[in-house]
Image: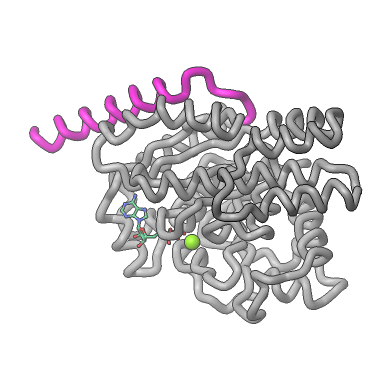
Amino acid sequence: MSSTIIPIASGKGGVGKSFVAANLAIALAEQGKKVVVADLDFGASNLHTCLGLNNINPGIGDFLRARTAKLQDLLVTTDVQNLNFLAGDVRSPFLANMHHAQKMRLIYNLKQLNCEYLILDLGSGSAYNTLDYFGMTQLGMLVTTTEHTSIMNMLTFLKLFAFRVIERSLPKNTFLEKKLKESYNLSVREEILTVRGLLDELALIDLQVAQQAELKWSSYRPRIVFNKCKTPDELTLLPALENTLKHNLLLRTDFIGCLFDDPAVSMTFQQRETLNKVSPSAEIAEDIRLLADRIIRLWKQPLRNSAGLLINNANKVYHQRSNEHKS
Ligand SMILES: Nc1ncnc2c1ncn2[C@@H]1O[C@H](COP(=O)(O)OP(=O)(O)O)[C@@H](O)[C@H]1O
Ligand SMILES: [Mg+2]
């Protein structure tokens, strides 16, 4: 059975990736799906905390050290039926800097895990390794807040991801690779390199290769989740964001979730427990369940008018809750 892989990335740290990874995995498992949630935030692992687990389990570091180890054998059962956890690097420092062959072995073996959903909690930012885990599927998930810096960092992440996809689509050719590296190393006086700019430069060298790279890039369609929203008005930026993604990054995306800011979340962090244990009836728990439900129904297909739909849904939920608070 091949699993649906959902790597969860963000340009900026602290936007809620680990919280979403853990609680989304729980919500999917509660819907009867067989789920594995893995900690790939090497160097800053805290997914176990969000799952209410202690930091004691062997994990990916042990897998990489022992050439015969199987990832499947390192899965840890949790209190939630259908949910298994794969630990990161508790016992292996500097895994964030694992070399290429190790990364490829890890990616290959993650894809072989026997489950319906594989959720990957990634590190923040655009390190090569993070970009490559995100690129394990064409439909990764980005978590962002609506704050300017968080959105800008997400755009940077996606631009560097585009460069990585383009780079990896090139035939092994030292001349092309050299040219690509030259394009990255601009002097401060030159214009900032864009996705279009990079493809245009490639086209000057080899039109066919450039067209193939553009085709490859156009097959990616990440899904964006907005977290810590205070009001649905924050989502008015969506149409402009959609335009920027399309024109500056040549990328189509879907806006798939809106999770509101909720004090119950910081309680889960303080108590090192899952949301279900701390506050199962919190509004954020309902937001997460809605997201899980949308993922089960819609993950594989492109969403039409996802900006409009998300804004409408978020407004509906928000006003319903405001009315409940009043009564
Ligand atoms: N919906 C939310 N409402 C309120 N606080 C949140 C929400 N989501 C995350 N947080 C807070 O944000 C902080 C960072 O969350 P975390 O999941 O560790 O982010 P990341 O993995 O992206 O670095 C935590 O302190 C958590 O309490
Ligand atoms: Mg995290």
Task: Give the dominant element type of the magenta stretch: helix, strand or loop.
Answer: helix
- What is the x, y in percent for residue 223? 54, 36
Which quadrant would residue 315 be assigned to in this image? top left
Please tell me which residue lies in front, 231 or 244. Answer: 244
- What is the x, y in percent for residue 97? 68, 71
- What is the x, y in percent for residue 199? 72, 35
Colour scheme in use: one colour
Tell me if I can see residue 285 in this picture.
no
- Left or right side of 62 for 76: left
Compared to 111, does 239 lie above or below?
Answer: above
| Residue shown at the point (90%, 48%) measured from the top left | 172
- Left or right side of 112 for 242: left
Look at the image and say whether residue 228 sits in the magenta stretch.
no
- Left or right side of 312 for 194: right
Q: Residue furthest top?
A: 304
| Residue shown at the point (66%, 80%) measured from the top left | 92
Tell me if I can see residue 296 in this picture.
yes
| Residue shown at the point (88%, 49%) measured from the top left | 175
| Residue shown at the point (69%, 29%) measured from the top left | 218
Compared to 80, does 44 lie above or below?
Answer: below
Q: Quick one: quadrant of the N terminus?
A: top right
Q: Quick one: quadrant of the C terminus?
A: top left
Q: Residue furthest front?
A: 189
Q: Which residues are magenta?
A: 300-327
Compared to 264, does 213 lie above or below?
Answer: above
Please tell me which residue lies in front, 102 or 250. Answer: 250
Please tell me which residue lies in front, 48 or 251. Answer: 251
